[in-house]
Amino acid sequence: MYKDNQLLSHLFYQPIQIVKLNEMLSDIGTQSTHPFMVIVYEGYLECTLQGRHVQLSPNSVMLLDDTDDFHLLETCESKGIVIQYRVYGCKTDRLLQDAILIEQCSYRLMNLAKEVEKEANAEGNNPFRLQKLFGELLEVLYSHLRDNKQQQEGLWIDKVLHYINLYFREELTREQMAEKAQVSPEHFSRTFHKHTGYTYSEYLTLLRIRESQKRLLFSMPKLDELAQEVGYNEGTYLSRKFKELVGVSPTAYYQKSKRVLALNTNHTACLLALGITPVLGVYSPFLESIEPVSTSQKLKGYEYGIYEYGIASNYQEITAACPDVIINYSGGNEKQSLLSVAPIFELPCRQLSWREQFGLIANIVDRQEVCKSWLQQYDEQIAQCNDILDQQIGARGTAIVWEIGSHQAYCLNSSHGRGSHILYEDLGFSRPDAIVTRNIEQTGYLTVDIEDIAHYPADYIFVTALPTKDFGKERLLTVLHSEKWQSLTAVQKKQVYFMNQYEIFYGYDPLSTATQLQKLMEVLTS
């Protein structure tokens, strides 16, 4: 609500002259003392603006606040209008004041311009209707400019942030980044702060200290060496900035027991296998059956590592947990939004085996001996399983793993788990030629129609998940009763295993792997 003694602060635009392009455009540059807009419906218009050659194409608009440097060259049989107008009020927003060219305008804007032209030329025209139509045209134009400005800002800020995230160890000045973004240093600073919540120097400091924290997860180098590695000249300056942001010195951070937060089920399972319960983690029903935890220890909105509600719904809980490190797969969208909370240690999603991920996490939490012991016991179990399989089935042959949804079927390779890593890497089964030729070792999985699973023969077929929808079940039943499926060697030898235990086979971690091994051995030796 405004008070009676306060004036509303806003702009008012009044059209004062509306003419066709071919009637007045050639004289307007010298005659006009008011801003104007040129709207081109059809054809092309050639002109110079501030010494630069400009071409207006169909469905384009040019806004000019200062007309001194505008000169018409050629109309090229263009059709359109020129609208001169007065501006009343305080010019707090210059979107419609600066000289600008807008191309590929919407049909609605062009249609409104034609209605403005028609109303201006009508006999006994209604000045209020003309003003209303002109206001609507400006509203559409303003919305287009605002959206375009935000989009352009988003484009360059994303590029700059990506560059800074890669090269923060180097000497990067605000002026260099502004030049890269092709904006003024002042505009760069305003936009950068609006998008990140930090000044440029604060953000650069944040990146360097977070990188220092990640280095200190594994070793305690000399402070001068650490400073050089993250972009500072000497260790005392790094130590001061580190303590300002983290609250403790680099040495104290290195020595303390880390409060760890895990953003997916696999890394939560790795921590549990090491005897550590994360301050916050993602839990599948399978993990909760092994390690029941309170609601306060679980991130909400996650299901099998799929983040449903976004970081915002958990941000307060994450901040309150005060983690010393956040563990996640690389490539997620969480990194930028959680940078202010703690360093994010990212593991390549499909480039590291579950053993390698387990080992790295053990290093972070200083549980290397626990990890080594766990893997040794697992390998002993694998040796026992292979002895049993040698006696019962002999040479392994080929195996294929299917996860069948309601719409499609997915064939999984080792990097995607689902038991395939155990079959191919631990128990000696090989991949059938039908999936090798489809490059599954590089892609990690194949997606096929449910009806096509009969075209991928193997000595052993494992199905770890079945459709949950009726139409998917019907499609699968049709396949299972087909002549093609019935002719498969695995079907005839009764070496097809419908396990349908998605919660267990989804995991690619120590705890899930151990249970998957048990389930696979149960069906192979039954």
Image (tube, helix red, strand yellow):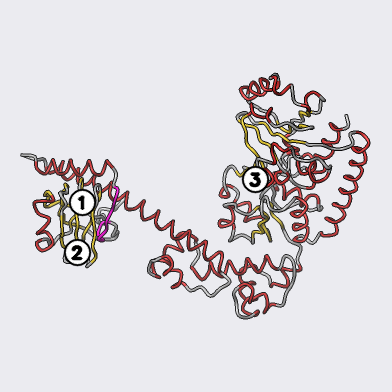
- Identify the residue under disc 1: 44
Q: Earlier in the sequence, mark 2 or mark 1?
A: 1
Residue 29 location (% of width, % of height): 13, 62
Going 58% across and 50% down the picture, which residue do you hit? 311
| Residue type, mark 2 in image | Asp
Q: Earlier in the sequence, mark 1 or mark 3?
A: 1
Q: Nearer the viewer, residue 71 or 181?
A: 71
- Where residue 453 appears, as percent x and y from the top left, is 67, 29
The answer to whether marks 2 and 3 mark residues whose Cβ atoms lie closer than 8 Å is: no
Left or right: residue 450 compared with residue 129: right
Magenta region: which residues? 96-104
Q: Is residue 249 at least partly visible in the picture? A: yes
**Amino acid marked by disc 1:** Tyr
Q: Amino acid at mark 3?
A: Thr
Q: Which mark is residue 158?
A: none
Percent position of residue 393, x then y = 89, 34
In the image, what residue occupies the spot 56% across and 49% down?
Answer: 312
Residue 36 falls in which quadrant of the image? bottom left
Real-space CA distance between mark 1 and mark 3, rounded to the nearest whole angstrom: 50 Å
As drawn, the label of residue 443 is: 3
